[in-house]
Amino acid sequence: MVDTIFRPFRSSEAERSDRSAGDRLRHRQKIRESIRENIADIIAEESIIGKSRDRVIKVPIRGIREYRFVYGDNTPGVGQGDGDSQPGQVVGKNGQEGEGQGEDKAGDRPGVDYYETDVTLEELIDIMFEDLDLPDLERKALRQLEAPRSSKRRGYRQVGIRIRLDKHRTVKSRIKRRFAAERRRRAADEANPIDAARDAALEAATGAAALAAPGDAEAADEDGIHATPAQPARRFPFHVDDLVYRHVTTQMRRESNAVVICIMDTSGSMDTMKKYLARSFFFLLYQFICTKYRSVEIVFISHHTEANEVSEDEFFHKGESGGTFISSGYQKALDIVAERYHPSLWNVYAFHCSDGDNFDSDNTAALRAAHELADICNLFGYGEIKPLGSRYYESSMLNIFRRLDADNFQTVLIERKEDIWPSFKAFLAKDKQQD
Amino acid sequence: MPGWSLDDLAYWDAKIRAQVDALGLDCYPQEFELCNHSDMLAYMAYSGIPSHYPHWSYGKAFEKLKTLYEYGLSGLPYEMVINSNPALAYLMRDNSLCLQVLTIAHVYGHNDFFKNNFTFKSTRAEFTIGTFKAHAERVRAYTEDPSIGADKVENILDAAHALSLQRRRNLAVKKLSPEEERQEMLRNAQAAHDPFKSIHRRPDYVEPDLQKAPLSPEPDILLFIRDHNPYLANWERDLLTVVDEEARYFIPQIETKIMNEGWASWVHREILNAIELPQDLHLEFLVRHNQVVRPTPGGINPYHLGLKIWTDLKRRFDEPTPEEIREHGTPAKTGMQKLLEVRETDRDQSFLRRFLTEELMREMDLFEYEPKGDDLVISKVADEQGWRAVKEQLIRSVGMGGIPVIRIEDADFGHKRTLYLMHDHDGRDLQLENGEKTLGYVYRLWGREVVLETVLAGKRTLLTFNDRGFSAKTLK
């Protein structure tokens, strides 16, 4: 006959010892890293452009796979039919076996760990912008305005969330309570000598046991409890009243404002693909600025030979035709800033996307306007969109703008959608590298 | 708690144990622990070992199990048993009484199997819990050591996990020590005894190359690297040891999945039919039992396959058909004697080879499928011509048969300390992406160039991983 033991369910213990928490956290971190590594692909997906920040998007990521040597696609297997299997019958799809069949399948095929993770756009943007920072510009007045301070310590409380637990103060209050309890006990002993005698006898007995284990006695000393040397170290657990949490309030900061001016060339040469690339870039810029400022306004200017302020919809969807005067777009931007967004109150970010095909006689004017714009903007950028191959037979403004020497002026060249993220990153990181 | 108490469990347990003894099973002492569903998920993620060392892959396993469970894509197992002495099993507290009774009976089946099957002899069940705890303590100590840290530990564990099943499979075959191996090589180099040596030409003596490492192809990749890469730190060696020991513990379970699950299912069915359950419990039992052992369409359910074979084996000894008597004679043992003997001496591959008959295969409608383009197409069914091939295919894919055999041929290939691995190709190609990544792990542990010879699409191919990364080259 064998022995059998039944152990009852202990809920408190089960809740306290969540073994897997650490490993789950690490797994999540790895997923986040993986999203970050693949961000260029994710950005290149059209679907996230121009969507609300709360939207949940499915990010296909290569799961954090565990590789082993496994057999490949030419591996036959054995299955069980429902009674009338015939040669030639199709029983499944190649390459999809293994997954979803669970343990029951005689694991002879590699599972495809292909995850889709739900991420909100907000979270994705956070991940994207983790490494990036706004170029540190010489705009002291503006920097005072945006001084970010979202939370401030305001004393201590007995309730709070775990990460704000002040361990030092918690331990101190436990020690205080312990001394108080000791004193209370001694007072009670004096009032009731019979119990005290019994306790003393007990202490003597357990004290002898404690002597046999000198480590315990020392530990008691280290605790700073010298009340009675023979007294064994009693358990004196933390009580909920001991816990001290730092109290943090969210401080309202002064509103810091920013305006993003999107200038796009809508001349005849800007085709759908070019517009799509420009739009992706503007999207990123807008999202990025939004993470840095409480309120962000956005202005759309489209230009060909003359410039107009337009709605977002028109900006991205309306086709125009005709020649190109880049200066017109810049002049419009300057006008709007002068009118509504004075640089002493607003952080101004301007970005211009064009295929660089400007009317020759306009180049001098464009350069002058760009100069002016750079003067009033925190950051002014020019993105030249040249889908692969077209670079060689079209003129380029990049050469012209090389003459514009301003710290807050950046140019990027975008050839295909995979370039958007790296060039965006380069665009914002450049300044940091100079430091 | 659903309408039962621990006393109820003890009551039924006593009845079950009486049947366990009546069947002649031989179990370790048994401990049952009641847990809730999230504990059960965690136990599953950690292969039942509550004190396992931490690694992100267990977090991944947990998330996956949890998601599948929450979306109702998979149920939870009713039970989880650990091969240890005393055997440890978890019961879900939310299960009905009938499920608990079924599970307890099922657990004794596993317990008996763990204690008696020969593949588990090497697992030292009395030390299981202690060993896993010690492993966890060592891994934690390295993680907390400021000169090592979590990232480096993870780096080694990731690589070691990828290779942990690349090892000799049959633990009952003794591994020779280097000295024994040398003696063996010298002995083999001598000409065999030849009674007609006066008329035969004496074969030339070929000096065996005793400088080579390894002397003979070595399947234990982790251990070989541990012992032969002088640049590994002690803690790195120790981590390889930990991973290797745990793999060694789990391999018997991989090797006997069909037998073990079939045996436990057979045992619980026998017991529950014998202990006279009240009618309502009995009806629920029939439903639950059927859920566990019903066939998986298109796949293989080890519970179903195993139970079929055990049942058939017992019948062949207790009630043989006239043809079977004609063919094999009258059985010398009772069915039960035979079962107890087989549960001790076989593993899945030999079990299927010896006891999966043509009739059974036809009854279960087993078939072989092959990939054709995007589809999996049935290539052979268990008819007169096909059943042998289907059976061979099944045997090849169970247990460790699903893991490619790769051996270390030479640890100093080209005198550059390149590690030369050879894939024992049996018609199944390696999956290339996995091959690339896993070879990268070998490179990480070996620290020098690693080459794997294999066959891809019928052509001998060398896969190489060195400081320039991965490359594949087809040989003439």
Image (tube, rainbow, N blue to C red):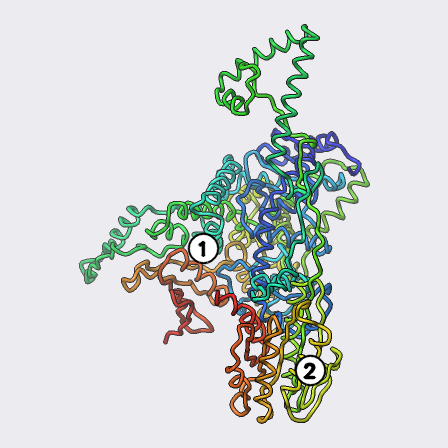
Please tell me whether residue B375 is drawn above or below residue B104 in the rendered image: below
Kindly state the secondary structure of the residue where label 1 is placed: loop
Q: Is residue A153 visible?
A: yes
Residue position marked by numbered label 2 in the rendering: A332
Residue position marked by numbered label 1 in the rendering: B166
The residue closer to the viewer here, B149 or A246, is A246
Q: Quadrant of residue A349?
A: bottom right
Please tell me whether residue A333 is drawn above or below residue B266 in the rendered image: below
Whole-percent x and y of residue B181?
30, 49
Q: Is residue A247 left or right of residue A133?
A: right
Q: Quadrant of residue B362?
A: bottom right
| Residue lying farthest to the right in this orientation | B280
Q: Residues within 10 Å of mark 1 (few under 14, many from 20)?
A: many
Q: Which chain hosts label 1?
A: B
Residue at 47 percent of width and 63 percent of height: B437
Q: Quadrant of residue A193?
A: top right
Mark 2–mark 1 distance (CA, rounded to whole Å)? 69 Å
Q: Nearer the viewer, mark 2 or mark 1?
A: 2
The amino acid type found where label 1 is placed reads Gln
Whole-percent x and y of residue B374?
61, 74
| Residue lying farthest to the left in this orientation | B198
Tell me, yes or no, whether dots 2 and 1 are on the same chain.
no
The residue closer to the viewer here, B55 or B111, is B55
The amino acid type found where label 2 is placed reads Lys
Q: Is residue A201 left or right of residue B101?
A: left
Please tell me whether residue A283 is drawn above or below residue A10 in the rendered image: below
Whole-percent x and y of residue B161?
49, 53
Residue at 61 percent of width and 24 percent of height: A235
Q: Which chain hosts label 2?
A: A
The residue closer to the viewer here, B393 or A36, is A36
Q: Are marks 2 and 1 in contact (CB under 8 Å)?
A: no
Q: Is residue B268 visible?
A: no
